[in-house]
Amino acid sequence: MSEPPEDFQTSQISEARRRRRHHGFIPTTKGDRAVFISQLAERLVANADFYLFSFLCGLVLAVAILLDNPAIYVLAALLAPFMAPVVGLGFATVVGSINFFFSSLVSLLIGCILVFISGALGGWISKLFPTLQLTQAHYHVNFTLPDFILLTIGILLAIYITVKAPKNRSLVASVALAYEIYIPIGLAGFGLTGGFNGLFPQGLEVVGVWLAWVILIGTIFLGILKIRPATVFGYLLMSILLAAALYTLLTNSAFGTALQSQMHPVGKTATVQVTDAKLITGTEVVTGTELVTGIAVPSATATLTPVPETVTVRESATPTNTLFPTDTPTATLAAKPTPVYANTYSSTGDGVRLRKAPNGDYLALLKLNTLVEILSTSEVDGRIWVNIRVVETNQEGWILQSLLQTATPSPTW
């Protein structure tokens, strides 16, 4: 009986492999397992499209930051490529391949650099808009529980799709990964060149912790799917990488405490009770009122300062002590200088920007109707800048005059 042709035997082997893989995630035989892992590694190698769409994602992200629009933030994540290097980090860790780990890491770093450069370009452009508001940006550089859950679901779903349905690379999981990794990277670049506090280096710190969590949870999940190192060196490498990821998570105190509260809260508005003050609202004057709108101007008070009695002792032939008051107590007026107060104001945003100097670096973001004390003014490049002190925090800085509502103080005696 003649032997079947070689191509017939090959087709039978391939069909057998497909049947075995149909009943489980990972082939059981050593040869099939090696082929399967090799095919997975090939699918997780970044190509030219990965870098192109990473840069496009960064550009759209810069626009989202400038416009302070949450919908465009989501659009930037949708335009991001399939985050294959992120999945590759966990895959290389569990397989124990040092070459593949560094290959995935370098690919991810290049993609992050492209997004960082795009964000830095947006930060440079932001200097052309002194009244720019960033109410959305600070939400993405903090450790929050929803972000933690989204990243976890994203990496688990991405690994499942890569292993179970390798030909169907759905972007659903990749959007979650890009949203949690690329957006903080772009915001860090934006904050570096735009002079915004709370974005750089906080964005980089967030990404570093998230990547450590991706490696940790990805390795565990791949182990559940029975993808494990094939050599002792692989197990040793996996242990080292897992220990490094776990150390990063445990030593980052912000990650441990800020899943329930933000790490770098933006300045918040509190109600300020103004005592012994006048609230000027148009023509109506109300005394001792709680600040809501208008300008609070503390009234000057008149105080009586008595002159102390002076005692003089005069000598005579007969030593006697006689008291001669040289003056009688008199009342004098000592008027305190009247501070000028104002409220922060903007007709286009939810806050105003406080700077270190006129047209200088960004210092803080003040909510509208924040009570401030006016210290001095200065004209720079045809615009009036006001040196102010925030009443609630005693923080000093400079702000455009057009972003304040002030009133002429009316002291009473």
Image: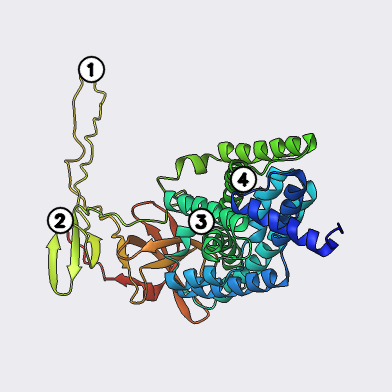
Give residue 388's quadrant in the image. bottom left
The mark lying in front, picked from 3 and 4, is 4
The mark lying in front, picked from 3 and 1, is 3
For the residue marked with disc 3, what is the amino acid? Val
Q: Mark 3 — residue?
A: 141
Please give left or right for residue 151 compared with residue 270 in the image.
Answer: right
Local SS, label 2: loop
Which of the two residues, 294 or 2, is positioned nearer the viewer here?
A: 2
The mark lying in front, picked from 4 and 1, is 4
Residue lying at 53% horizontally and 60% vertically, measured from the top left: 173
For the residue marked with disc 2, what is the amino acid? Gly
Residue furthest front in the image: 1
Local SS, label 1: loop
Q: Residues within 10 Å of mark 3 (few under 14, many from 20)?
A: many
The mark lying in front, picked from 1 and 2, is 2
> Residue 288's mark?
2
> Residue 222's mark?
4
Q: Mark 1 — residue?
A: 319
Which of the two residues, 347 or 55, is positioned nearer the viewer here?
A: 55
Circle 1/circle 2 CB separation < 8 Å: no
Residue furthest right in the image: 2
Please give left or right for residue 91 compared with residue 406 in the image.
Answer: right
Which of the two residues, 313 or 390, is positioned nearer the viewer here?
A: 390
Please give left or right for residue 186 compared with residue 268 in the image.
Answer: right
Report whether residue 206 is seen: yes
State the separation of the CA atoms marked 1 and 2.
60 Å
Q: How many marks?
A: 4
State the separation of the CA atoms marked 3 and 1.
85 Å
Give x and y (percent) for residue 52: 68, 74
